[in-house]
């Protein structure tokens, strides 16, 4: 009997030690789970903000966007890279309706226990009425773990090129009236203008009497545009300034043809506004509208954002312009019932702009 009691007393400490070990293992597992939960919270607690540094922007005119990231100590922030020139063929960095042209990063700022990293993006948009800027994804590295933090978006009014007005926004305060100028320079200018008009009228009458022949009719829009493109094909611009002037001339040929052939304000409208005008014209098909967009987008970057394309990209830009004109002309001929009207040509490869 004593032997049984001794055996029972000896077995109790053994069962207690097993329970203690199980409790220790459970506490360790719970601690690991809590630490993993806290780490996941800390990695997701980063904040990224996007701000447009303008009340309104103009279509095709660059503007600035600020991106700030608040992070913890020991973490690294990598902002998105911007391709050189922001061209379509180089897969540009887009943020909603805006295209990034360049980026400038600023030194880290200490704020209490957090660190703030910021970068300034130079962007451009061709949207009408309103542009949605953002979101942008920022890479954050914490030790060996990397994750992305996404900014919000911002809406900014876009001033129209046709009217020069922006959507309704808060007007500025009314300042003091400007002084009324003197009328004497205006009368002098009107007198000079009247003298010039009178002299021009006399010269026109004398010239009309000496040359009674009727002036030849103007060249139709399509042959005139093709002749201008043929003349541009014979040029070989070498300097960046010559390349820019060449691309702007190609852009002018396309817009002059659209203005004359379709009777629309193509010289003043943006590319997106032209697409809206094409929707109400049955002569311009969707394929022709896309061809015009592909031809004008690289030239808009050169004309407004001062992007300088390489010399080898000039031929491709001219080919896109010729394809767009041919596509619109084919639709016009089919709508007018011209027999044997050619089908709309296939679009060429987009021209790289860097």
Image: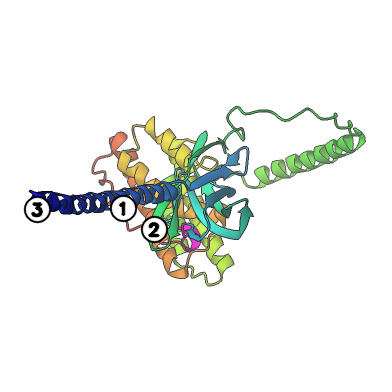
What kind of element bears circle 3? helix
Q: Which secondary structure class fits the magenta region best?
A: loop
Q: Is residue 97 above or below residue 247?
A: above
Residue 241 image position (x, y, % from top left): 58, 66
Q: What label sits on residue 124 in the rendered view?
A: none
Q: Which residue is mark 2?
A: 146
Q: Nearer the viewer, mark 3 or mark 1?
A: 3
Query: Which SS class for mark 1?
Result: helix
Horizontal relation, residue 276 to residue 213: left or right: left
Q: Is residue 128 visible?
A: no
Q: Which residues are magenta?
A: 80-87
Separation of residues labelled 3 and 2 (CA atoms): 65 Å
Residue highlighted by disc 1: 28
Q: Is residue 25 magenta?
A: no
- Disc 2 on helix, strand or loop? strand
Q: Nearer the viewer, mark 1 or mark 2?
A: 1
State how far apart marks 1 and 2 are (Cα).
27 Å
Q: CA distance from mark 3 to mark 1?
A: 39 Å
Q: Residue at x 81, y 37 (%)?
A: 194
């Amino acid at each position: 009997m004593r032997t049984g009691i001794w055996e029972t007393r000896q077995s109790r400490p053994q069962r207690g030690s097993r329970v203690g070990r199980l409790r220790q293992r459970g506490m360790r597992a719970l601690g690991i789970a809590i630490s993993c939960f806290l780490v996941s919270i800390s990695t997701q607690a980063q904040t990224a903000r996007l701000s447009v540094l303008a009340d309104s922007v103009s279509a095709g005119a660059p503007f600035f966007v600020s991106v700030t990231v608040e992070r913890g100590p020991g973490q690294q922030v990598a902002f998105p890279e911007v391709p050189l020139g922001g061209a379509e063929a180089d897969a540009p960095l887009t943020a909603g309706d805006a295209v990034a042209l360049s980026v400038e990063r600023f030194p880290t700022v200490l704020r209490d226990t957090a660190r703030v990293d910021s970068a300034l993006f130079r962007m451009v948009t061709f949207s009408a009425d309103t542009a949605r800027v953002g979101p942008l994804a920022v890479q954050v590295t914490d030790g060996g773990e990397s994750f992305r933090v996404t900014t919000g978006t911002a809406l900014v009014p876009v001033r129209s090129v046709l009217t020069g007005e922006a959507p309704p926004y808060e007007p500025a305060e009314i300042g003091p009236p400007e002084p009324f100028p003197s009328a004497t320079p205006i009368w002098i200018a009107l007198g000079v203008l009247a003298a010039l008009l009178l002299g021009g009228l006399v010269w026109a009458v004398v010239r009309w009497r000496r040359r009674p022949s009727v002036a030849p009719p103007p060249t139709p829009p399509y042959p005139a545009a093709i002749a201008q493109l043929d003349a541009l094909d014979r040029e070989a611009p070498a300097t960046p300034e010559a390349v820019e002037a060449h691309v702007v001339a190609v852009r002018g040929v396309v817009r002059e043809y659209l203005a004359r052939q379709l009777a629309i304000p193509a010289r003043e409208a943006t590319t997106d506004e032209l697409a809206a005008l094409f929707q109400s014209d049955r002569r311009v098909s969707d394929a022709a509208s896309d061809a015009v967009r592909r031809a004008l987008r690289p030239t808009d970057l050169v004309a407004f954002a001062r992007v300088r394309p390489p010399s080898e990209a000039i031929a491709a830009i001219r080919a896109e312009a010729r394809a767009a004109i041919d596509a619109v002309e084919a639709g016009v001929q089919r709508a007018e019932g011209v027999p044997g009207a050619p089908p709309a040509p296939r679009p060429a490869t987009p021209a790289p702009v860097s």
